[in-house]
């Protein structure tokens, strides 16, 4: 077998381990979709009436808010990933892996793939809830496929960064704390309200931070609005963050100690 | 004999803390080697270097014929490591832990399951096989940990303080397991701070203190290096006691108990000569005891108090 096929086999083994953990504690996986769902219900039923008034004519607030909520969902597993990686390292099992002739990044890849599988599951749950409370996307199969691809790309990007953060964290609590800001980033954008209502400085940040083009793209794909350059920019952000996160994670994981 | 482990001049410091100060190790295949030392002597660092976890600052080592620096993956494929703190996956069952190891050794489904079940039986874990490792007792975790190390059938096994924290019964069980391993032809490198353990198990013992090897040899050889061996002769009759004292001029007298301490390491020829002299003088001691220095004596004689600036 070649090094590549070793890497694939070992990553698959680590993915099975990760999914077994997830199956053993399903509540942990499912509770990840809890926060986005609470935000969804809160904004649609509590703030939505007022916020919806600021939207252009004919746009329902549910349809406006769901794309951003989906991006929050894609990133919601990041804390869990960072904690899992950090726990593995601090618990000593990683030292065992390191003394075995296995592909060096298999553990990380296994965690990332496991997180993506769980994120897809959570996304399906949140989409289900959204449909139940009146989300009516205009997307056809092609748009859904593109939207799904973007969400998976985003999950990959966030997960690789949180893996690196998990590796460098001293303990699982610290890991959880450093990753949390990532989950709040979508809020500082057009997720809940159009940016036009914000003060200049906040508005500038909200329009140019990485999540902004992603939200616009997803909104465009699902509800049929204009996307423009945002699609390319969103994909570029995702790929760039994924690559940087991957290289960073590999570096800190394999650095000599 | 072929060397399972051969290391020369291993050095390691963390910052300005010198942890290993140039140690040489030679372990023949199929033997048990004990690295003995107090806490902070550098035992764990030595194991971490030899098992590819930590890079040495200087020195070379070959493990099972593979150079540590040039072919770490070759070393990894030949060794099994059980660290000081158990490295089992708490969220998997005992059996799943073993199958995870089998999969990482790419053994295939059938062979992996076969080995997992054989190890569960061998380590008396069949009943607990389906329970999460998190629920295991300390002794069970150690056994599972070692079983996981054996899945890949390593030629050289490193055990870092394998019995620290175990109750006496579990410790005995662990000793038996280690002896069985070596009977099967593998080489065992273990670290311990228990002299008794090194004495029980090891063919060769190296005493590590403040990053230096201060002595090396079999338990018997080490014991011979410290003075203090003697034969104790007890006499009921004070007259005989006096005569005997005249016979053995270098003996220490203990008038109160009527005991003579004749220096000597108590091996058979020395003992025979002593008995012959007693017979020649028609002396009949009431009791005879041989005191051989134990490893505690060796340990205390060889390991000094901690100087500043070393540790781990």
Image (spheres, coloured by chain):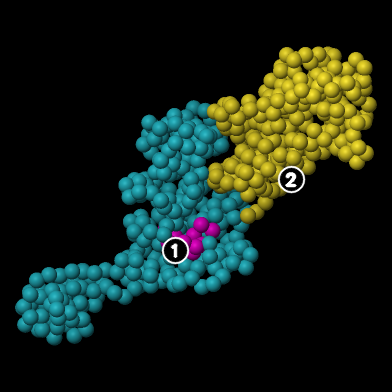
Picture quadrant where residue B246 is located: bottom left
Q: Which chain is cyan?
A: B
Q: Which chain is yellow?
A: A
Tell me which segment is drawn in magenta.
Answer: B34-45
Q: Name the residue under label 2.
A: A248
Residue A40 coordinates in the image, percent (x, y): 75, 23
What's the residue at 47%, 40% (across, down)?
B148
CB under 8 Å between discs 1 and 2: no
What's the residue at 48%, 70% (across, down)?
B306
From this viewpoint, is residue A6 visible?
Answer: no
Q: Name the secondary structure under disc 2.
A: helix
Residue B127 coordinates in the image, percent (x, y): 38, 31
What's the residue at 14%, 83% (across, down)?
B245
Chain of the residue displaying label 2 = A
Whether residue A104 appears in magenta in the rendering, the answer is: no
Q: Name the secondary structure under disc 1.
A: loop
Chain of the residue displaying label 1 = B
Characterize the local packing of mark 2: few (<14), some (14-19) or many (20 or more) Cα atoms within 10 angstroms.
some
In this rendered view, identify the residue nearer to me: A56 or A227. A56
Characterize the local packing of mark 1: few (<14), some (14-19) or many (20 or more) Cα atoms within 10 angstroms.
some
Relative to B280, B262 lies left or right: right
Residue B22 coordinates in the image, percent (x, y): 55, 67
- Residue B38's mark? 1
Query: Looking at the image, is B70 positioned above or below residue B127?
Result: below
């Amino acid at each position: 077998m070649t090094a590549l096929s070793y890497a694939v086999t070992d990553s698959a083994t680590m993915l099975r381990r990760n999914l077994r953990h997830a199956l053993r504690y399903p509540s942990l996986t499912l509770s990840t979709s809890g926060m986005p769902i609470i935000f969804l219900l809160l904004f649609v039923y509590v703030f939505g009436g007022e916020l919806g008034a600021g939207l252009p004519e004919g746009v329902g607030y549910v349809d406006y808010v769901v794309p951003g909520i989906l991006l929050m969902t894609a990133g919601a597993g990041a804390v869990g990933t960072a904690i899992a990686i950090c726990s593995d390292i601090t618990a000593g099992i990683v030292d065992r892996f390191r003394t075995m002739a296995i592909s060096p990044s298999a553990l990380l890849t296994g965690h990332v793939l496991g997180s993506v599988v769980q994120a897809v599951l959570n996304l399906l749950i949140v989409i289900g809830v959204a449909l139940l409370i009146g989300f009516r996307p205009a997307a056809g199969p092609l748009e859904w496929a593109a939207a799904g691809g973007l969400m998976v790309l985003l999950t990959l990007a966030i997960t690789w960064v949180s893996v690196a953060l998990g590796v460098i964290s001293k303990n699982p609590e610290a890991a959880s704390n450093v990753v949390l800001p990532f989950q709040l980033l979508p809020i500082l954008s057009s997720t809940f309200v159009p940016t036009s209502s914000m003060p200049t400085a906040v508005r500038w940040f909200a329009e140019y931070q990485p999540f902004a083009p992603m939200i616009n793209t997803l909104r465009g794909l699902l509800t049929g609005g204009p996307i423009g350059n945002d699609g390319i920019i969103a994909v570029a952000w995702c790929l760039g963050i994924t690559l940087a996160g991957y290289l960073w994670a590999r570096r800190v994981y394999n650095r000599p100690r | 004999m072929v060397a399972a482990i051969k290391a020369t001049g291993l050095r390691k410091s963390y910052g300005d803390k010198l942890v290993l100060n140039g140690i040489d190790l030679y372990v023949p295949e199929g033997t048990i080697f004990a690295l003995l030392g107090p806490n902070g002597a550098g035992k764990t660092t030595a194991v971490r270097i030899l098992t590819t976890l930590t890079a040495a600052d200087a020195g070379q080592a070959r493990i099972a014929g593979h150079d540590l620096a040039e072919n770490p993956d070759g070393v990894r494929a030949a060794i099994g490591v059980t660290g000081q703190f158990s490295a089992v996956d708490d969220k998997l069952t005992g059996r799943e832990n073993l199958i995870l190891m089998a999969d990482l050794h790419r053994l295939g489904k059938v062979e992996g399951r076969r080995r997992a079940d054989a190890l569960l039986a061998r380590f008396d874990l069949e009943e607990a096989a389906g329970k999460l490792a998190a629920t295991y007792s300390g002794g069970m975790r150690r056994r599972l940990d070692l079983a996981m190390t054996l899945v890949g059938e390593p030629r050289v096994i490193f055990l870092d303080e394998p019995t620290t924290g175990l109750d006496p019964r579990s410790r005995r069980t662990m000793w038996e397991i280690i002896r069985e391993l070596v009977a099967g032809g593998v080489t065992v490198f273990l670290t311990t701070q228990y002299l008794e353990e090194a004495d029980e198990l090891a063919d060769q013992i190296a005493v590590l203190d403040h990053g230096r090897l201060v002595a090396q040899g079999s338990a018997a050889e080490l014991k011979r290096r410290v003075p203090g061996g003697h034969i104790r002769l007890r006499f009921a009759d004070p007259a005989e006691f006096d005569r005997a004292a005249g016979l053995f001029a270098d003996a220490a007298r203990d008038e109160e108990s009527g005991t003579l301490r004749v220096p000597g390491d108590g091996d058979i020829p020395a003992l025979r000569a002593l008995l012959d002299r007693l017979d020649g003088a028609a002396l009949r001691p009431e009791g005879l005891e041989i005191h051989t220095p134990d490893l505690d004596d060796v340990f205390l004689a060889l390991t000094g108090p901690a100087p500043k600036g070393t540790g781990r």
